[in-house]
Amino acid sequence: MAFIVKNTTFPSLLDLLSPYSCRGCGRLGEAFCECCKNNIMHNRNGVCEKFRDHKNLPPIYTVSSREGVLGELIHDYKYYSIKALAKPLAEMMSESLPVRLPQNSILVPLPTATHHVRARGFDHMYLIAKNLSKIRKIPVGRMLVRNKNTVQVGANRKERLSQANLAYDLNPRARIDKDKTYILLDDVWTTGASIEAAVKKLRAGGAKRIIIAVIAYSS
Ligand SMILES: [Zn+2]
């Protein structure tokens, strides 16, 4: 008799087998060790170059490029649902942000499509936001919602942008305060279309101060 293993079963099994071995170096102890984190944080040359063409956007902070270990971490976190990686990813994000952030800041995770949340068993950016919230003592606000049945399939930037504009909306239950700083969080910057759309919504809702923080950018 054959039985089907749902792809969500595999990751939890992986987690079970090696709950405390570093994804970077294999060392036992934690999901991603201090040493591997430092390696990433100290090899961050030219991270600003990527965003030079986006002068209309608020300041963008990022940990590093998606190449190498950081990319694998994000991949394992999202596609193998290894929740333990939320903490080290949030710690690196925290380090990539200015030491002093404006008072009254709010962390705004970019909302994920519901079917992805269901497949993973958790909302990956929300979980990172919660971890970052603990580290920086900044509350999380779900200021944006994701509209149903919108996926980015557009080939070019313009198509992706118009699709992204349809994908997000202001959360009708949240109220934008123009005196607060909204720190928009996302995992990977590819074309920037999602972030750009989200910024537009926040601004339309009255947000005056926005900061962007992405874990990685794809090169
Ligand atoms: Zn390590």
Image: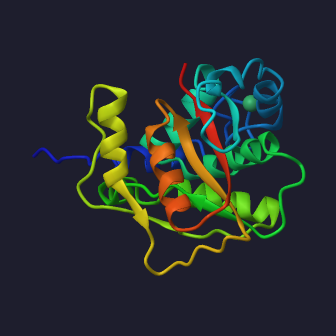
Residue nearer the viewer, 35 or 212: 212
On screen, residue 81 above or below 103: above
Task: Spot the residue most to the left.
Answer: 1
Residue nearer the viewer, 50 or 58: 58
Quadrant hosting ligand 1: top right
Q: Is residue 136 left or right of residue 119?
A: right
Number of disc labels: 0
Quadrant occupied by the C terminus: top right
The answer to whether any part of residue 158 appears in the image is yes
On screen, residue 183 above or below 151: below
- Residue ID at (34%, 54%): 167
- Residue ID at (26%, 51%): 150
Q: Is residue 100 left or right of residue 164?
A: right
Q: Is residue 56 left or right of residue 173?
A: right
Q: Which x, y percent locates residue 54?
A: 59, 31
- Residue ID at (46%, 30%): 191
Q: Which x, y percent locates residue 84?
A: 62, 51
On screen, residue 213 above or below 134: above
